[in-house]
Amino acid sequence: MGLKAVSSAIISFSLLLLLASTAKAQSNGVFDVTKYGGKEDITEALNNAWKDACASTNPSKVLIPSGTYSLRQVTLAGPCKAAIELQVDGILKAPVNPDQFSDGSWVDFRHVDQLTLSGRGTFDGQGNVAWSKSTCNKDKNCEGLPMNIRFDFITNGLVRDITTRDSKNFHVNVLGCKNLTFQHFTVTAPGESINTDGIHIGQSTGIYIINSNIGTGDDCISVGDGTEELHVTGVTCGPGHGISVGSLGRYPNEKPVSGIFVKNCTISNTANGVRIKSWPDLYSGAASNMHFEDIVMNNVQNPIVVDQEYCPWNQCSLKSPSKVKISDVSFKNIRGTSATPVVVKLACSGGIPCEKVELADINLVYSGSEGPAKSQCSNVKPIISGIMSASGC
């Protein structure tokens, strides 16, 4: 046999071994990370299993079985050749030290169509040490910490039954996505954890958050610029800072926010209830077609808020009003108890007053020592109908 023939035979044999190895690692379209050598640290095994599953021309699943695993920073990228699912039944633990991350995320899903993230598992960010050293509660230019999960440019996605715990920063960041649903999703972190928004959405369309439980140290759900058609239904929020649109107007060239629907939610023991916020004296923007309906408040501070003088850390100027236009907003059938006497505060921009704001059937009770519940309105003339338990507006 000649040298050329021997070389060809070796290559063919190597390909057969590779195919046999891949076939062994996957069964019936399931790529099990433990079959890729994943034991305590599954980073390399997950990367390899994802690569093989993503190359499959048939729908595939990457499986992380029950157990506790270490996982370093990882990017799970497409495009894939068919629908792909990551089923996490185990507990994944992030590196404790933030210095072990090269950018702002722990697990990043990118450019995937027909993605499903499922299972009984938990993404544990182990954020306690990072929170204790963070300056983000008082410094707007603080160094960013890694988020637990990012979804960048995902289309037709579903996240169900997954838990994210103790992220060092936001638990979930959604950017540039279309038609992405979170169902029976759980976020858990202490109320004192810093900057740990549950789900932050920006520049995305058709996002659904359904029957989910979010308790954290910042906004349960926060809405950034360019968000359209966000539907939040059946969410339990608390502890945290409530459900917020904004903050808006902090950066130039922000895209409008439109089509925000929050319905049938329960908010408990939070610093705010439902809130729209924009910075004063900075950049222009617009937010419209936003509706909050059938919401129960339990011992919530500031249950209904429009704050166009949002100025955390006192590092901005109140000399000029907000340049963000807010219009077509409704708060309907919002009931329960407030921890503060001002149950409705609509502080709109003096330069661009709010338009088409409706308050209907607001029944919020304050039973503290500072008198009956009241409402405050500036630079807005809301349309009021039905029950209004708080006088003033």
Image (spheres, rainbow, N blue to C red):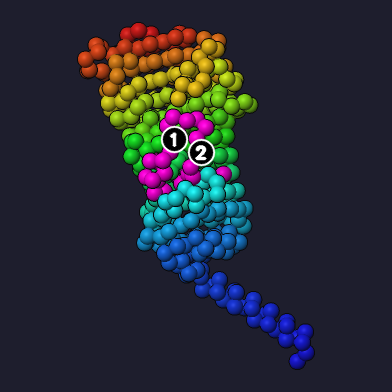
Q: Position of residue 262 (x, y in %)?
A: 42, 29
State the residue position of label 2: 143
Q: What amino acid type is highlighted by mark number 2?
A: Glu
* Crowd tier of the residue under label 1, counting other residues whose Cα lies within 10 Å: few below 14, some 14–19, many 20 or above: some
The front one of 318 and 371 is 318
- Is 45 contained in the magenta span? no
The residue range painted magenta reads 125-152
> Does the residue at mark 1 contact the one at mark 2 (Cβ under 8 Å)?
yes
The vertical placement of 289 against 105, above or below, is above
Q: Position of residue 177 (x, y in %)?
A: 56, 41
The front one of 390 and 4 is 4
Query: What distance separates the C-alpha of mark 1 from that of mark 2?
Result: 8 Å
Q: Residue at x 40, y 25 (%)?
A: 274
Q: How many marks?
A: 2
The vertical placement of 201 against 119, above or below, is above
State the residue position of label 1: 135
Farthest residue, direction bottom: 1
Q: Position of residue 178 (x, y in %)?
A: 56, 40
Residue 340 seen in the figure: yes
**Tag 1's secondary structure?**
loop
